[in-house]
Image (cartoon, rainbow, N blue to C red):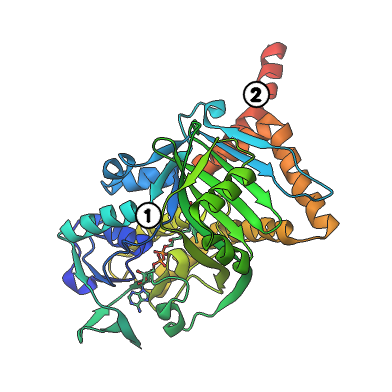
Amino acid sequence: MSVDKHSRILVAGTGPVGLISALALANAGFGVILAGPPARADDGRTTALMVPALKFLDRLGVLDALTRDAAPLKVMRIIDGTSRLIRSPIVTFRAGEIGEEHFGFNFQNRILNAVLEKSAEAHAGIEWRRAMVENWTFEPGKVVATLSDGTSVESPLAVAADGRNSPAREAAGISASARSLPQAALVLNFAHSRDHAFASTEFHTETGPFTQVPLPGRRSSLVWVLRPETAKEFADLDDAELSLRIERQMQSMLGRVTVEGGRQIYPLSTYLPQRFAHNRVALVGEAAHVFPPIGAQGLNLGIRDVDQLVEIVTKHIDDPGAPAALSAYDSARRPDILARTSAVNLLNRSLLSDMLPAQLARSAGLNFLGGFSPVRAFFMREGLRPGSGFSSLASSLRAPRRSRDAAAD
Ligand SMILES: Cc1cc2nc3c(=O)[nH]c(=O)nc-3n(C[C@H](O)[C@H](O)[C@H](O)COP(=O)(O)OP(=O)(O)OC[C@H]3O[C@@H](n4cnc5c(N)ncnc54)[C@H](O)[C@@H]3O)c2cc1C
């Protein structure tokens, strides 16, 4: 399919979601103008992407280049590391339990950004202007972006992938509820003396999660959510002392820890727009949803935004930014974004809360997950293929009826 030049779609923002949007729209046959700076080479984080996101990246032709330097996630564990009165049992999810090889892979953002950047540069359908959008105006049937290089772009649809403060979102008149949290994520990589066996462990603590995720070899990445002042204090420790704190926090489960260079701190906040598209602007990635890094959700959700956006605009090829297309996108994304946002925020609040009911609810939830294997399998399948948990639950509920019917024959 080749779409008329006049309907070139503008993607604003060159984080992972902007680059993925540009590639996916260009692969679907749309001409794309991408506006934003070169991809970040200094992002020290890693991102765990689950199987549906990997399949999407595979369709874009970038997965092989990514998995070479990434580690598979075969086991995911949640440990209650609080010292609260009510504590939860350890919950372990094993991909093998539902017949899968892995839940996903953990990628270094630096490599993810570089691979996506190279692919976008090489794509004939993408024109990348390495400039910021400085101004947005809205005219009948089109949006006009003025860029910092003095050029302007007219498009029937602007994809806002311009991050949590999204200037495009604001210009389109979409308000967002925003809250800064009393938390910051200390991010680093470390080596360890024992094998991780491709297991990730999320310790729940009173200040937020402490999450170890495997990297290739005897190395792991860490996202340690702390009070902002503690994150700063820990980031300033010398290597030996910080290594010791991490080893203690992990109860030495990976043996001796040696931190690598390059610590970064990410202040945490939440953003939730009141709608996900309006005025010829569709929101994707952090322009559409921001919540704390618990359970590796953010970019996975951002990739689902792009997947559904491409599906919808392909059905509205004559005018991809028409009100009908934007309203279909808003309705399609709303349930998924609201469900993930509220689940993550609720879990985060229950960790921070000293209130007994919040702790009871969290503990009961994890007890339920940990103690009953069909429920665990259900959640694992939902993580791998949203919707498949429901269908396998339905078929397991139907199974006794079939055997009853067989007995009656
Ligand atoms: C510590 C931490 C760990 C995380 N771990 C995971 C994980 O394991 N799994 C997971 O799925 N998610 C994870 N996330 C979430 C994930 O990092 C985000 O969902 C993802 O980075 C969002 O990407 P984005 O492209 O939407 O936004 P960003 O990366 O913020 O990109 C926004 C882009 O817009 C550009 N921009 C801004 N203004 C303009 C303008 N006016 N004109 C043009 N361009 C503009 C910026 O320069 C930037 O390039 C984590 C988040 C944190 C904080």
Position of residue 391 measured from the top left corner of the image (x, y, whole percent): 57, 36
In this view, the mark in front (2 or 1)? 1
Say which quarter of the image contains residue 6: bottom left
Between 235 and 338, the one lying in front of the other is 235
- Can you tell me whether the CB of the residue at mark 1 lies under 8 Å from the nearest atom of ligand 1? yes
- Quarter containing the N terminus: bottom left
Q: Which mark is residue 109?
A: 1
Apparent side of residue 337 relative to residue 372 in the rendered image (left or right): left
Q: Amino acid at mark 1?
A: Asn
Say which quarter of the image contains residue 148: bottom left
Residue count near mark 2 (Cα–Cα under 10 Å), binned few <14, some 14–19, many ≥20: few
Q: Measuring 56% from the left and 48% from the top, which residue is drawn there?
A: 211
Q: Secondary structure at mark 2?
A: helix
Q: Which mark is residue 250?
A: none
Q: Amino acid at mark 2?
A: Ala
Q: Measuring 38% from the left and 50% from the top, which residue is drawn there?
A: 108
Position of residue 406 measured from the top left corner of the image (x, y, whole percent): 66, 14
The answer to whether residue 289 of the structure is visible from this angle is no
Residue 246, above or below 375: below
Of mark 2 and mark 1, the one earlier in the sequence is: 1
Q: Which residue is mark 2?
A: 399
Q: Secondary structure at mark 1?
A: helix
Q: Measuring 84% from the left and 56% from the top, which residue is drawn there?
A: 357
The answer to whether residue 171 of the structure is visible from this angle is yes
